[in-house]
Image: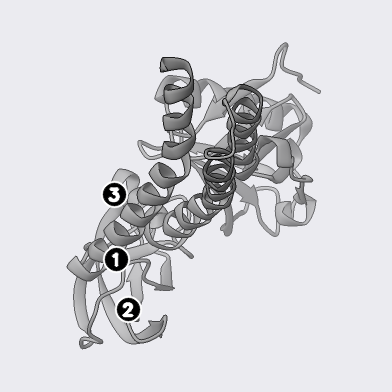
Amino acid sequence: MTTASAPLTVVAPAGIRERATFHGEAVEIVRGRHVTRIPVTAIHDVEVHAYGLVVQLTGRSDDDVDHAAAQRMGHSSVAAARTFATAVRAAAEAAGRRPNGLSQVTSTTRAGNPFGSWWFRILFVEALLGLVLLVTYPYDENTASAAGMTILLSALLGPCAWLVCRFAWDHMLRDPWILLRRGVMVNGEVLQHRRKGGDNALYYPMLRFTTEEGEQHEVLSCVGRAGQGGSGRIALRYDPQDPGTRAGRTLTFSHFFWSLVLSGLALGLVVASAGPPIALLVLTFGG
């Protein structure tokens, strides 16, 4: 068995929480809290593209390739990705490939660490500001009530700001941003539209397209529009690392507008949350 003297790691571009690590016997792809472990005996080849890595798994025989089970992720350095791929290929040759690579792959989800999450950091900052104010602010019968309400309001608005930021990122901004950075442009077809939301709902088209590798997918677009629109051929972008779940048409005004509204609301909540405590601190130490 060939083992690496030190783990080799390929990190995705900034803003994308992905990395692949090779320890000599297996490749581990980490996406947030989800870890996919791929033994070298299950790997047929590792391809390096401009957009990222593609780990091809063995199929029905050790010489066959299961294209549908390929694992994809981005990289921030082509040189590091090539070094990574070379080491994995050498280990796979030395260990001997086995058929049915997908059956050898394991996926686990690590327990979340609340102390490392954004909501905990916001609450910690809010609590710290409140503690400083409680200790240092010169309270009297005229100022105690106003200062207490300020601390309470700040503590409530902080988590609200985080919730709005997270909703805007997960549902409106993340996928279009990823497609803008690494999406591949192809021609596709609109099959139908699905409505999401209430009275101010956006319509999201169901897209059918063929990737550059010849794989056909039907994916709900991550970019919506105000009207339902029609069907037909359109230009779209898909994520080469995850073509089966992430694709979208050109950014529309409606999608951009609601993204801007949510981002503005989140920014307003952040300012409203942090502004009063900071102002009280300035008045306390400046006066």
Looking at the picture, does residue 138 appear above or below residue 176?
Answer: above
Of all residues, the one furthest to the front in this rendering is 141
Q: Is residue 38 at least partly visible in the picture?
A: no
Numbered tag placed on residue 202 in the rendering: 2
Looking at the picture, does residue 213 appear above or below residue 224?
Answer: above
Of all residues, the one furthest to the top in this rendering is 5
At x 28% / y 81%, what residue is drawn? 190
Amino acid type assigned to the residue bearing label 1 in the image: Trp
Q: x, y (%) of residue 139?
A: 59, 31
Which secondary structure, mark 2?
strand
Quarter of the image with the N terminus in it:
top right
Q: x, y (%) of residue 12?
A: 48, 34
Q: Earlier in the sequence, mark 1 or mark 3?
A: 3
Horizontal relation, residue 28 to residue 72: left or right: right
Q: Earlier in the sequence, mark 3 or mark 2?
A: 3
Tell me where residue 102 sits by quadrant.
bottom right
Numbered tag placed on residue 258 in the rendering: 1
- Tags 2 and 1 touching, CB below 8 Å: yes
Q: x, y (%) of residue 155?
A: 59, 46
Looking at the picture, does residue 191 appear above or below residue 107?
Answer: below
Label 2, label 1: how many angstroms apart (C-alpha)? Answer: 9 Å
Which secondary structure, mark 1?
helix
Residue picked out by circle 3: 180
Judged by depth in the image, the label closer to the viewer, 1 or 3, is: 1
Tell me where residue 129 sits by quadrant.
top right
Horizontal relation, residue 61 to residue 244: left or right: right
Label 1, label 3: how many angstroms apart (C-alpha)? Answer: 18 Å
